[in-house]
Amino acid sequence: MSDPKPLLLVAACALVDSDNRVLIAQRPEGKSLAGLWEFPGGKVEPGETPEETVIRELYEELGVVTKVACLAPLTFASHAYERFNLLMPLFVCRRFENTPQSREGQALKWVRANRLRDWPMPPADEPLIPFLEDLL
């Protein structure tokens, strides 16, 4: 058996606006998977819960403020990338403060759940779409 790949824990969030649209962000040039659209989130840091990661990342990336009580776990993705295995819980957040703004140069779009497939996404994000379609 080859060397085992490390497990990368990433937490993501489907921000949902009052019109039931989901926010997606485009990965900027210079990052892996640049140009693909994803749900906001990021790597879970040591000592952090996935919920704390989502709250931190939403603020850092988008200037959005929310609380753990406003995050509802929906599903998760597990994907084997070439150099690591990804585990990504997806939370839904409908209650947040501030209008999301790009703080890291990424393009942002509000998209209906049934149109998410119109935007190219990383392989780990794609299996999350049916859960959002069922919810919204």
Image: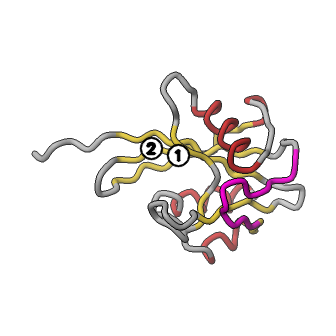
Q: In the displayed structure, would residue 131 be above or below residue 109?
A: above
Residue 12, position as x, y percentages in the image: 60, 46
- 133 left or right of 38 in image: right
Mark 1 lies on residue: 76
Residue 115's quadrant in the figure? bottom right
Q: Position of residue 58 (x, y in %)?
A: 71, 44
Instruction: State the image coordinates of residue 60 (x, y, percent, origin top left).
Output: 69, 43
Say what secondary structure mark 1 lies in.
Answer: strand
**Dots 1, 2 in contact, CB < 8 A:** yes
Q: Earlier in the sequence, mark 1 or mark 2?
A: 1
Residue at x 48%, y 50% (from the top left corner): 77
Q: How is the image coloured?
A: secondary structure
Q: Residue at x 87, y 47 (%)?
A: 98
The prevailing secondary structure element of the residues shown in magenta is loop
Q: Which span of residues is magenta-colored? A: 98-109
Marking on residue 87 = 2
Q: Amino acid at mark 2?
A: Leu
Q: Amino acid at mark 1?
A: Phe
- Residue 5 painted magenta: no
